Amino acid sequence: MPPLIALAATLGGLVAVRWLYRIAKRVNHELEEVRMARVAEAARSRDIPTLRRDPRTGAYRPD
């Protein structure tokens, strides 16, 4: 009986490791998507021109 318990524990451990590996891989993939979205958003925000106040008219205009 003890060899059967050891075999069951080994198989259970392998299943748990496989499950944890898949979870970690999925989470890392989701985090990478979020990182790339933040980088893309930052790149888009650089395209917006800075407004400066025109001293003669008081209006704000792009440089």
Image (spheres, rainbow, N blue to C red):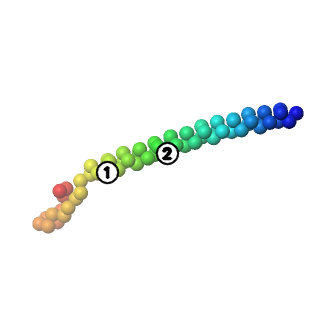
Label 1 CA crowd tier, 10 Å (few <14, some 14–19, many 20+): few
Task: Give the x, y percent position of residue 20.
Answer: 63, 41
What kind of element bears circle 1? Answer: helix
Q: Is residue 41 above or below residue 13?
A: below
Task: Give the x, y percent position of residue 17.
Answer: 66, 39
Front residue of 30 and 60: 30
Q: Residue furthest front?
A: 3
Which residue is at a point 49% across and 45% down the rendered structure image? 31
Q: Is residue 5 toward the left or the right of residue 30 in the image?
A: right
Which residue is at a point 80% across and 36% down the rendered structure image? 6
Front residue of 22 and 11: 11
Label 2 CA crowd tier, 10 Å (few <14, some 14–19, many 20+): few
Q: Is residue 61 above or below residue 26?
A: below
Task: Give the x, y percent position of residue 22.
Answer: 59, 37
Front residue of 34 and 7: 7
Q: Amino acid at mark 2?
A: Leu
- Measured Cα–Cα span from mark 2 to mark 1: 21 Å
Q: Is residue 60 toward the left or the right of residue 28 in the image?
A: left
Q: Amino acid at mark 1?
A: Ser
Which residue is at a point 58% across and 42% down the rendered structure image? 24
| Residue on which the image places disc 2 | 31
Instruction: Indicate which disc, 2 or 1, sits on the residue closer to the N terminus.
Output: 2
Task: Give the x, y percent position of residue 58.
Answer: 17, 66
Identify the disc placed on residue 45: 1
Q: Residue furthest right?
A: 1
Identify the disc placed on residue 37: none
Number of the front mark, 2 or 1: 2
Q: Is residue 24 toward the left or the right of residue 4 in the image?
A: left
Q: Quadrant of the C terminus?
A: bottom left
Q: Name the image quarter holding residue 13.
A: top right
Which residue is at a point 14% across and 67% down the rendered structure image? 55
